[in-house]
Amino acid sequence: MSCYQAAWEKLFKYMDIEPRLLPPSVNGFKLDPEQVRDALDEHTIGVVCIMGNHYGGQYDPAAEINEVVEEVNARKGYQVGIHVDAASGGFIAPFQQGVPPWDFRLNNVLSISASGHKYGQSCCGTGWVLWRRRADLSDHVGISVSYLGGKAHSYTLNFSRPASGVYSQYYKFLHYGMTGYRQCNDNMMANAKFLRDGLRAMTHGDKPRFELLDDGDEHCLPVVTLRLNPECEFPYDDIDWQHGISQHHWYVGSYRMQFNHPVSEQTLPLFHDAGAEESMFRIVVKTHLTRNMAEHLLDSFRATADFFDAVDFSVIPDFQMHHLRHKDQRRLTNHC
Ligand SMILES: *Cc1c(COP(=O)(O)O)cnc(C)c1O
């Protein structure tokens, strides 16, 4: 899917892998199983499902994609497997009720990755990958060394790695336990809902000021993704909004709905049904965002709205031109 995280761009480039990037709909941000069916061929190495993309926090429908892969494998004699990129969702989805199966319960899921340093709450650089079977990690790439006193297996590009992340993760596992991680999840999801409800209630005239683009209040990451309501026809965009909010010391990441194709280097639309110049922004809720802070963030949104509403953009000479020129500059810096 085109909503992949930059880590995948490295894989494509370093390992010379041709990605088949399927653009989802802006009304969902999810891999479409039918598009997957059409994209599979005899050269396919595997299918990646993202459990929580970094744009909107939605989970790809892994169970449905598993069925498509099963059917195509049976019909064509392929052995295509699924990798689940649970970098963010790996420490969220297991603590949510009613998420459809996305892990080794699905027979074609062969490997799962998760970042310890995101919702695992370890320190930066800690990541995990699990294989369904030992045999699926080829001995050709899984290096075994014996000169450090006993056998050690390694599957990393660099060799020496700090152990601090593992210790930090171990401490968090023991400190929180399953109950603690579940409580953290529930708090973050409740704060994300609190923000969504507050943002949904903000209006401009008789119209909602924002359009919410994320997956709602459950079965997704605690990420709130939205854009200024296009119907309001504001003379500024979501990227200006990020700058407005930053005056209140909040960093709310805004993006254009575009990505840089890792092979052709072309700038392409992220979604099949939204223009590459359109924009959005997101709030990532983490454990340290307290309810008081969430209230302050909503107040900052209100203050930013009041500030922008009080400006008569028509009297600012060259605003439109200046604004567009500005946009051009930002395009170079804003797609990570
Ligand atoms: C963060 C992220 C990655 C990269 O993981 P790191 O642990 O930072 O290397 C990959 N995929 C997704 C969906 C991510 O959110």
Image (tube, helix red, strand yellow):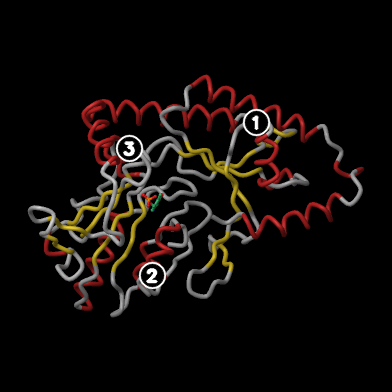
Q: Which residue is mark 1?
A: 301
Distance between the alpha carbons at the discs numbered 1 and 2: 42 Å
Q: Nearer the viewer, residue 228 or 307?
A: 307
Q: Which residue is mark 3?
A: 122
What amino acid type should be assigned to the residue bearing mark 3? Answer: Ser
Distance between the alpha carbons at the discs numbered 1 and 3: 31 Å
Establish if 198 lies above or below 75: above
**The quarter of the displayed image where residue 116 is located:** top left
Which quarter of the rendered picture does the N terminus lie within?
bottom left
Beta carbon at label 1 within 8 Å of ligand 1? no
Q: Residues within 10 Å of mark 1 (few under 14, many from 20)?
A: many
Give left or right: position of 197 versus 96.
right
x, y percentage for residue 101?
25, 48
Q: Which residue is mark 2?
A: 14
x, y percentage for residue 4?
43, 58
Q: Nearer the viewer, residue 307 or 249?
A: 249
Establish if 191 lies above or below 118: above
Distance between the alpha carbons at the discs numbered 3 and 2: 27 Å
